[in-house]
Image: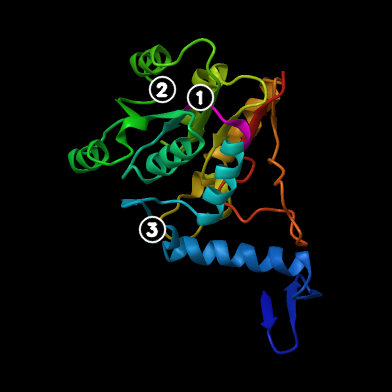
């Protein structure tokens, strides 16, 4: 149980007859409230209320702010994203490439719906975006993606397609070799593990989720580590992100 008193400025938790109280100006209080906020946001479909340059973008805004800074630091030549949906994230990354005057996007989806395809083809940033229709783990899809990438290009990979454990593991094995030292493969929506029991969830999400796949993958592949990118600016007391992508940043270190 969590009790919030804004007038007195504290958060109190009670669990198994143990009561703890934290000042609202503490990182501990922020973490507790953020956890509750993320769960409430999931239940109310908070992330379904945003768009970017005209296209719906079903992502937590903080995740997008964080990843834009990483993209600016890495400056990839190619960003590969599995999962297109409405295309908002593709447009978001394309805008960053235009601003940096470097990079392009390859978007992959098992089905790119005609109205979304039309909107992306007519978007003013369409020249930065290439679309590949097909399952992200099919051999033909992987071959097509690889054919669009030159040997000396720096690649970042973002996994946001099917979020089942086995699918994500197959994506990691297929696309991680494209990622060079210092770049990342980002596994999205590991929050699934933390919202079991909420609306639109399944009981097997306790293990059948991207977070578990990412953690298993780095154990098998020591050339990757799970490492949160350090922000270049932080004058606050908070060091842990509010995110839908826990354990999601896999950095290639060797």
User: Where does the magenta region start and end?
Assistant: 73-78
Q: Position of residue 38 (x, y in %)?
A: 56, 61
Please report whichever mark, 1 or 2, sits nearer to the chain's N-terminal start. 1
219 vs 242, nearest the viewer: 242
Residues at marks 1 and 3 touching, judged by CB atoms closer than 8 Å: no
Q: Quadrant of the N terminus?
A: bottom right
Q: Quadrant of residue 254?
A: top right
Q: Which residue bears the numbered disc 3?
A: 48
Q: Quadrant of residue 219?
A: top right
Residues at marks 1 and 2 touching, judged by CB atoms closer than 8 Å: no
Give the SS element for disc 3. helix
- Magenta-colored stretch includes residue 56: no
Taking the image as shown, residue 158 lies to the left or right of residue 230, namely left
| Comparing labels 1 and 2, the label whose residue is closer to the camera | 1
The correct choice, above or below, for 77 with respect to 163 in the image is above
153 vs 1, nearest the viewer: 153
Q: Residue at x 62, y 62 (%)?
A: 35
Q: Which residue bears the numbered disc 2?
A: 137
Give the SS element for disc 2. loop
Q: Which mark is residue 77?
A: 1
**Alpha carbons under labels 2 and 3: distance apart:** 26 Å
150 vs 10, nearest the viewer: 150
| Comparing labels 2 and 3, the label whose residue is closer to the camera | 3
Q: Position of residue 113 (x, y in %)?
A: 22, 39
Q: Residue at x 43, y 44 (%)?
A: 92
Neighbours of disc 1 within 10 Å: few (<14), some (14-19), many (20+) = some
**Alpha carbons under labels 1 and 2: distance apart:** 22 Å
């Amino acid at each position: 149980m969590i009790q919030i008193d804004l007038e007195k400025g504290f958060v109190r938790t009670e669990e198994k007859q143990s009561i703890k109280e934290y000042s609202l100006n503490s990182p501990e209080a922020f973490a507790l409230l953020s956890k509750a906020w993320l769960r409430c946001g999931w239940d109310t479909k908070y992330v379904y209320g945003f768009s970017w340059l005209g296209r719906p973008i079903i992502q937590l805004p903080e995740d997008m702010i964080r990843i834009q800074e990483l993209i600016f630091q890495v400056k990839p030549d190619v960003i590969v994203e599995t999962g297109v949906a409405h295309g908002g994230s593709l447009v978001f990354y394309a805008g960053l490439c235009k601003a940096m005057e470097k990079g392009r996007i390859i978007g992959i989806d098992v089905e790119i719906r005609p109205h979304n395809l039309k909107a992306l083809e007519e978007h003013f940033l369409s020249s930065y975006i290439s679309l590949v229709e097909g399952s992200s783990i099919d051999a033909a899809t992987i071959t097509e993606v690889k054919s669009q990438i030159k040997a000396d290009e720096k690649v970042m990979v973002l996994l946001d397609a099917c979020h089942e454990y086995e699918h994500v593991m197959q994506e990691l094995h297929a696309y991680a070799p494209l990622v060079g030292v210092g770049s990342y493969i980002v596994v999205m929506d590991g929050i699934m593990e933390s919202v079991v029991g909420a609306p639109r969830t399944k009981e097997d999400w306790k293990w059948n989720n991207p977070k578990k796949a990412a953690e298993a993958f780095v154990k098998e592949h020591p050339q990757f580590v799970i490492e949160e990118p350090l922000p270049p600016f932080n004058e606050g007391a908070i060091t842990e992100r509010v995110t839908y992508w826990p354990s999601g940043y896999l950095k290639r270190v060797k």
